[in-house]
Amino acid sequence: KGNALAVVVNELLGQLDVVQKPLEGIMKNHPIFSGTALLGNGQIIVAIDPIGMLSISNQFRTSQKAAS
């Protein structure tokens, strides 16, 4: 769609193959997070939705232009 998004990270900790579960409850329709996964050591990780981040970025950019 001609959009670009960059995410800055300090460090990559590794790569995992996980089964992602969708969010439920009050987080069900969160615009940035898409789900969670339970690691073998009991830790929970949250998956980020890059399309959701792009949507939020576009909304922010549009509101900034309107405010100018």
Image (cartoon, grey):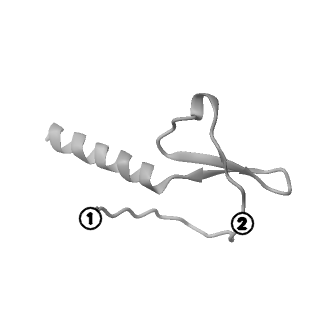
Front in this rendered view, residue 11 or 49: 49
User: Residue farthest to the right?
Assistant: 41
Q: Quadrant of residue 5?
A: bottom left
Who comes first in sequence, dot 2 or dot 1? 1
Cα distance between the residues tagged 2 and 1 = 30 Å
Q: Residue at x 68, y 70 (%)?
A: 15
Front in this rendered view, residue 58 or 13: 58
Residue ID for mark 1:
2
Picture disc at residue 17:
2
Disc 1 marks which amino acid? Answer: Gly
Q: Residue at x 86, y 56 (%)?
A: 41
User: Residue farthest to the left?
Assistant: 68
* Label 1 SS: loop
Give coordinates of residue 38: x percent, y percent. 77, 51
* Label 2 SS: loop
Q: Quadrant of the C terminus?
A: top left
Please state if 15 lies on the left or on the right of 32 as rendered. Answer: right
Picture disc at residue 23:
none
Disc 2 marks which amino acid? Answer: Asp
Q: Residue at x 67, y 52 (%)?
A: 20
Instruction: Say if 42 sits above or below 27 in the image.
Output: below
Q: Residues within 10 Å of mark 2 (few under 14, many from 20)?
A: few
Q: Residue at x 47, y 64 (%)?
A: 8
Q: Quadrant of the N terminus?
A: bottom left
